[in-house]
Amino acid sequence: MPILNVLTYPAEDLRRISEPVKEFDARLDQLASNLVETVLQFRGCVGIAAPQTGHATRLIVIDASRYRKPVPNRGLLVLANPEILASTGSAVSREGCLSLPDYTANVARATAVTVRGVDRRGEQIELTSEGFEAVVLQHEIDHLDGVLFIDRVSSLKRDVFRRKTGKPGKKGA
Ligand code: NI
């Protein structure tokens, strides 16, 4: 199965609002499989959203079991048209993104979310996640609305870090 090319910031396609999935057909299934393959290609990668690969489609793949630390998780999840129905709590944690490979940032997110979506066969799913997996869900759902983690930091100077040095400061911010 093909591995998809991942767009990096500031690619304009990362800023588009993605379209809802309407047809749960072979094409969608293939895109979902390709997204899964693409996640597996990157060590420690825990999620991807279709628009990161140039497909403006509301489809995400997450797998919090691939995180370097063991965290509560449901393994591989493929969700079309995911919506956050409820969220509680707030905590800051360090996030990265395949589309911003040189940076990480401290981002405040809800600590638990209830998400409704549709699996690749068209069956509705509703789930509640906490902690790391909840953060990943929020991060990937943001991509469907053209939102990147750098949009969520309170200070580009204080909260964004270059991966190599770990020092604050974002080029071209
Ligand atoms: Ni991302």
Image (tube, rainbow, N blue to C red):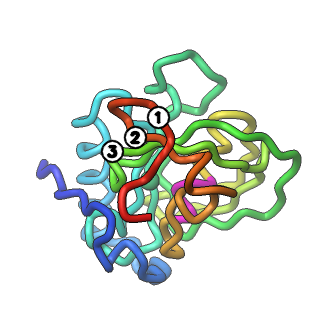
Answer whether residue 109 is magenta in the image: no
Crowdedness near tag 2: few (<14), some (14–19) or many (≥20) residues, C-alpha within 10 Å: some
Work out which residue is located at the far left of the displayed protein and give it: 2
Which amino acid type is shown beneath numbered disc 2?
Arg
Q: Is residue 163 above or below residue 77?
A: above
Disc 3 on helix, strand or loop? loop
Which amino acid type is shown beneath numbered disc 3?
Asp
Q: Which residue is mark 1?
A: 167
Q: x, y percentage for residue 52? A: 33, 63
Q: Which residue is mark 2?
A: 162
Q: x, y percentage for residue 9? A: 32, 64
Work out which residue is located at the far top of the displayed protein and give it: 70
Q: Residue at x 60, y 46 (%)?
A: 159
Residues tagged 2 and 3 counted as in contact (Cβ below 8 A): yes
Question: Which quarter shows the C terminus?
Answer: bottom left
- Does label 2 or label 1 sit earlier along the sequence? 2
Disc 1 on helix, strand or loop? loop
- Does label 1 or label 3 sit earlier along the sequence? 3
Q: Which mark is residue 145?
A: none
Answer whether residue 140 is magenta in the image: yes
Crowdedness near tag 1: few (<14), some (14–19) or many (≥20) residues, C-alpha within 10 Å: few
Q: Is residue 122 left or right of residue 83?
A: left
Disc 2 on helix, strand or loop? strand
Residues tagged 2 and 1 counted as in contact (Cβ below 8 A): yes
Q: Nearer the viewer, mark 1 or mark 3?
A: 1
Magenta span: helix, strand or loop, mainly?
A: helix
Q: Is residue 142 left or right of residue 54?
A: right
Q: Residue at x 47, y 72 (%)?
A: 58
Instruction: Give the Cα separation between the discs numbered 2 and 1.
Output: 6 Å
Q: Is residue 89 above or below residue 117?
A: above
Specify start and end residues of the magenta stretch as a single range.
138-142
Q: Is residue 125 left or right of residue 41?
A: right
